[in-house]
Amino acid sequence: MKYTYLLKKNSDFKLVYLKGKSKVNRYFIMYAFENGKDHNRLGISVSKKVGNSVIRHRIKRLVKESYRQHEKMFNSGLDIVVIARSGAADLSYRNVESALLHLLKLHKIYDGLIKH
C-alpha cells in the first residue's frame, strides 16, 4: 500500500466512527472521514462474531489486497474504516473486491480513473 497508511490507534478509529459518514452493504460497513492530509489511512475491524482468528485474518488480508489493487484510483486525504459483517466469513476475493468497490463508490471515493 504505497499511498496508504494503516489506522492502528483506538482513538483514530473512534474519531472516524464519531465524525465519519457510514455506508453499508451486505458484507461490510464503511466509515469515511477527511483527515486533511495528502494520504489515506485504512483501518479494518473484524469481530469475533464473524469467525475464528484464521477467518478474521483472512478477511483482513482480502480487504487489504483488494484496496491495494485499486489504490491509485482513490481520492486521497481520507481515513477509511472497514468493518466486516458476519456474512463476510465465506467470501472469495472477487466478492470482497466487489463489495469494497461498491462501498467506495457510494462514498464517492472511487471513480475508476487512475490518479497520478
Image (cartoon, rainbow, N blue to C red):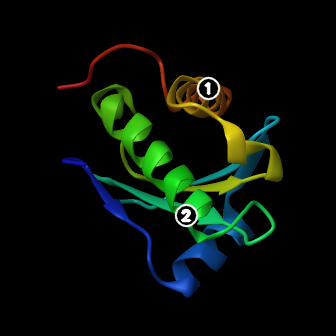
Query: Residue, x 69% and y 40% (percent of image)?
Result: 90
Residues at marks 1 and 2, CA–CA distance in whole angstroms:
18 Å
- Name the kind of residue labelled 1 in the image: Asn
Q: Secondary structure at mark 1?
A: helix
Give how far across and how far down residue 58 sits, in percent.
51, 53
Query: Residue, x 25% and y 48% (percent of image)?
Result: 1
Please identify the quadrant where the C terminus is shown.
top left
Instruction: Locate residue 115: give its quadrant.
Output: top left
Mark 1 or mark 2, earlier in chain: 2
In the image, residue 22 sits, relative to residue 11, either above or below, namely above
Given residues 86 and 22, the one toward you in this image is 86
| Residue hosting label 2 | 54
Give how far across and how far down residue 91 sits, in percent.
65, 35
Residue count near mark 2 (Cα–Cα under 10 Å), binned few <14, some 14–19, many ≥20: few
Residue count near mark 1 (Cα–Cα under 10 Å), binned few <14, some 14–19, many ≥20: some
Instruction: Locate residue 69: give its quadrant.
Output: top left
- Name the kind of residue labelled 2 in the image: Val
| Residue hosting label 1 | 95
Q: Is residue 28 left or right of residue 107?
A: right
In the image, residue 64 sits, relative to residue 15, either above or below, namely above
Give how far across and how far down residue 83 sits, in percent.
68, 57
